[in-house]
Amino acid sequence: MQKFPMTVAGEASLRRELTELKSVSRPKITAAIAEARAHGDLKENAEYHAAREQQSFCEGRVKEIESKLSNSQVIDVSKIDPTGRVIFGTTVTLINLETDATVTYQIVGEDEADVSSGKISVISPIARAMMGKEEGEEIVLKAPAGDIEYEIDTVKHI
């Protein structure tokens, strides 16, 4: 079975969501179903059907999270000795060679990716271009608007 990489923070976030779903959402949905059942005819009861739909979504998400956690490989990059090489979990600062603009990304698992907060998926084109490279090396990212050249400025294990 293939293991999927995940950061410590990503695992903690999924565990929090799982706990929330099991301890808060499930009881609320169960209560909503019981209340809707008390109203009588279930065939024409919109509240009942809405609560059942919520229950279905909740149970599906619980199974999805449990599956992700069971197939995850949690990597704590802060416990790996820094080598200046880009690996999963590192935070990388890039310099655009054309504009001298800098951008910083942390390479994370697929489910943790959020570009607006500087987290990119390990399978994204830019992360794949950086993997295995060292500080000072240049990478070329093939974009629809043309190739973009970056230099890897710093690689941090945080």
Image: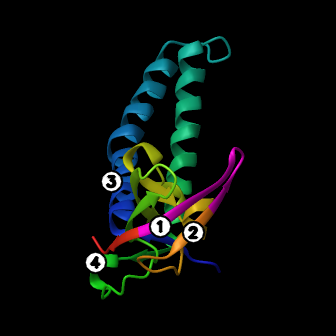
**Vertical order, 81 against 102 (above or below):** below
In the picture of the structure, the residue carrying the numbered disc 3 is 16
Look at 54% across and 59% down and name the residue there: 110
x, y (%) of residue 21?
A: 40, 45
Disc 3 vs disc 1: which is toward the camera?
Answer: 1
Look at 50% across and 62% down and name the residue there: 66
Q: Which residues are magenta?
A: 141-152
Side (left or right) of 63 relative to 89: right
Look at 48% across and 27% down and name the residue there: 33
Q: CA distance from mark 1 to mark 2?
A: 6 Å
**Vertical order, 103 against 116 (above or below):** below
Residue 43 falls in image quadrant: top right
Picture quarter with the C terminus? bottom left
Evaluate whether residue 91 shows in this view: yes
In the picture of the structure, the residue carrying the numbered disc 4 is 78
Q: Does the magenta run of residues contain 86?
A: no
In the picture of the structure, the residue carrying the numbered disc 1 is 151
Nearer-the-camera pick, 64 or 3:
3
Sequence-wise first label, 1 or 4? 4
